[in-house]
Image: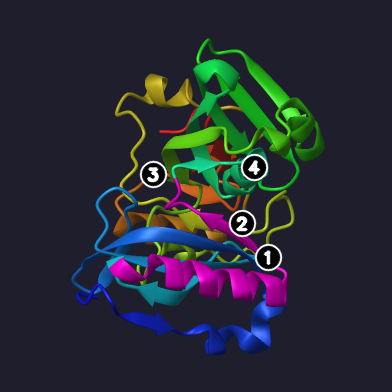
Amino acid sequence: MQDPTEINNYTNLLASQASEYTVVEIHGVCETGDECFVDDDNLQFYSAYARHQNGTSVVIVDAGKNRLDTLRSAVATLCAKWGWTSLDFTQTWLTTYEILQAAKLYSLEVSLALAGGFKSTHFITSNGMDLFTDEGCDGNQMEYTEEAFLEQYPDRLGKIWMITQKTLRVSTVIAKADITENGFNLGQEKELSFKRLFPYPNKKLPASFFDAVRLLTRPYYPITDELFKEIMSVTKSFNTDIVVDENGRQMTFGNADGVYQLMPLMKKL
């Protein structure tokens, strides 16, 4: 999109499936060839993405640089009509509620500014549902429900959070190349506590076997031979040793205890 005054609306494509979507994200976007990448810092235009319950996303409005207010108005109308939550990543500061909704999708590094200009750095992650981990810059971690987090930092304090870095827990790309299109079939798996699994492109374990093993944590998850073969084939094309579930948990795969298993990592690569 080159024209800064242009706006394209595709929301009619979702009208029959509106109840399956929960969140609309407004982002700055950079276009390279046939792919569009979220880039809130070096944007070429703006887009609104509707996030499906299964974690995938679809663009519903594109807007040139001069039409951000029009895009925001369109998103507000859709959220009121269909009960969606809006997350506007073009804004510098967000409320606690807005930060928590963002943390359900992203791992966040944020700056907290309270009365008097005091600022501190926090790292906020979520299990994708109702539990949040807040890690301070001193390394101390606290776990909160959404209600408890809002009691600690109520919305009446206003927009006190600024996102300094974010990582989408499934993919950093929202485009045709979204890795959610390459999910594995888990229909025959009986031992898994998660519902979706994807390749994580260009991530490799340490070359040393002992260094790689130190990254692993139990419990492991046994998988069928068929799924192991599928994972081996797909991950090879993505140049990776890592897969992720719908909550962004990274795992590797291999033979452990005499069977094929998915093996979670203690820390993300």
Mark 3 or mark 1, which is nearer the start of the sequence?
Answer: 1
Q: State the residue position of label 3.
A: 241
Instruction: Evaluate if marks 2 and 4 touch, with contact meaning CB atoms under 8 Å apart.
Output: no
Q: Amino acid at mark 3?
A: Asp
Q: Nearer the viewer, mark 3 or mark 4?
A: 4
Q: Amino acid at mark 1?
A: Gln
Residue 218 visible to the viewer: no
Q: Secondary structure at mark 4?
A: helix
The circle drawn on residue 188 is 1
- Where residue 151 sits: x, y (%)? 79, 30
Mark 3 burial class by Cα count in 10 Å: few <14, some 14-19, many 20+: many
Mark 2 or mark 1, which is nearer the start of the sequence?
Answer: 1
Q: Amino acid at mark 4?
A: Leu
Instruction: Evaluate if marks 1 and 2 touch, with contact meaning CB atoms under 8 Å apart.
Output: yes
Q: Residue furthest top?
A: 138
Q: State the residue position of label 2.
A: 224
Q: State the residue position of label 4.
A: 100
Instruction: Name above or below for residue 115 compared with residue 191.
Output: above
Q: According to the image, what is the colour scheme of the structure? A: rainbow
- Where residue 200 sits: x, y (%)? 41, 50
Magenta stretch prevailing secondary structure: helix
Please report the bounds of the magenta region as a residue range.
66-91
Q: CA distance from mark 3 to mark 2?
A: 18 Å
Q: CA distance from mark 2 to mark 4?
A: 36 Å
Mark 4 or mark 2, which is nearer the start of the sequence?
Answer: 4
Is residue 26 one of those drawn in magenta?
Answer: no
- Where residue 127 sits: x, y (%)? 67, 41
How many marks on residues? 4
Query: In terms of depth relative to the viewer, which is nearer, 5 or 175?
Result: 5
